[in-house]
Image (cartoon, rainbow, N blue to C red):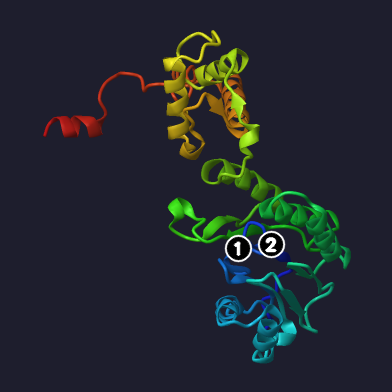
Amino acid sequence: MALARFGTFSIVAYDRDRQLWGVAVQSRFISVGSVVPWAEAEVGAVATQAYSNVRYGPEGLALMKSGLRATEVVRKLTLADEGRDHRQLGVVDSKGEAAAYTGTKCMDWAGHEVGDGFACQGNILFGSGVVRAMARTFESTPGDLPERLLAALSSAQREGGDRRGMQSAAMLIVRKGGGYDAGSDRWVDIRVDDHPSPIEELKRIFKLYDLTLLSREDPASLQTIDSDLARALQHDLGVLGYYSGRSHGVWDDASRAAFAKFINENNFENKLRDDGKVWPSIIVHLRELSQGEVQRRTKTAPIVSGALSQGPGAKAPRGSPSTHEKHHASK
């Protein structure tokens, strides 16, 4: 029986300053995020690939939790595995020590590179430059861990990536209490299971994920809502149906209520402020939505008269009650 192989490139990494551990991966394989990345806050991260042994994930984390360092974890996992010649593994531990392993029977090109706080590995690649580019890009890219991991994936793809093409990608980053409502440690957990350009799609998803769930923007970037910005926000909120007044540039109660409604309906509650300032990411996103709404009205032919004349924030039109409403009204 043929081995179920899949070509993959990945990076495991540690951010000492922010106490983050993460994995980013791309592969010509469906739903690579369900197989390769494993991480636990204050413990470490694991990438298991090639003819992947998924047990390396939880067992590797358990070994690190017991006190073993990354190099010891790699040695222990692979020595105990009869299929080790077909495996590839990257590990970074709680202190940032990294280690990697590439089995002798992994399909060419296969290899890895270990650096300070990270390990890059890949198999069935266009060439050694793929892993080298990942490592150099991670080392030289400014910013925090998500930006550096995504940049590393992009650089690997520019060097040829998986020589069979692209299909899926994922990024998992953990931080103690970093998950939704501090209920888990999954600070970033996003996946693209099947897409012709999975890395670019992963970036698009992260941009929205960041806007909705994270707080990564520098407070120094906050913009005061002066008359020009108020006018722009009123215009965009008006296009989307959240604001019905004139774009007069005064940030009054009606404007604030419209803006709050937009924020809450779009799940951006962590971006709502009461100090007369607004995050740049919200300004940009609101403008993009407004421009998209204009395009929708311009290019989509309405089936029902007036159906496209209002944005998603507008009140629903009054009319005959639906069957569901009639049912409740009769009770």
Name the residue at the left extreme.
Answer: 331
Few, some or many C-alpha atoms within 10 Å of disc 1 (few <14, some 14-19, many ≥20)? many
Residue 50's image quarter? bottom right
Q: Quadrant of the C terminus?
A: top left
Residue 17's image quarter? bottom right
* Residue at 44% from the left image edge and 19% from the top image edge: 304
In the rendered view, would you say 39 is above or below 292? below
| Total numbered labels placed on residues in the image | 2
Mark 1 and 2 residues: CB-CB less than 8 Å, in contact? yes
Q: Closer to the camera, 137 or 223?
A: 223
* Residue at 78% from the left image edge and 67% from the top image edge: 116
Q: Position of residue 112 (x, y in %)?
A: 80, 72
In the rendered view, would you say 316 is above or below 98? above
Q: Identify the mark nearer the N-term, 1 or 2.
A: 2
* Residue at 17% from the left image edge and 34% from the top image edge: 328
Residue type, label 1: Gly
Q: Position of residue 51 (x, y in %)?
A: 68, 78
In the rendered view, would you say 330 is above or below 110? above
Q: Secondary structure at mark 2?
A: strand
Kindly report the distance in space between the C-alpha atoms of the residues bearing marks 1 and 2: 7 Å
Give the numbered dot on residue 33. 1
Q: Quadrant of the N terminus?
A: bottom right
Few, some or many C-alpha atoms within 10 Å of disc 2 (few <14, some 14-19, many ≥20)? many
Residue type, label 2: Val
Q: Which residue is mark 2?
A: 25
Judge from the rendering whether residue 262 lies leftward or rightward of residue 141; answer left or right. Answer: left
Q: Closer to the camera, 33 or 249?
A: 249
Judge from the rendering whether residue 117 lies leftward or rightward of residue 322; answer left or right. Answer: right
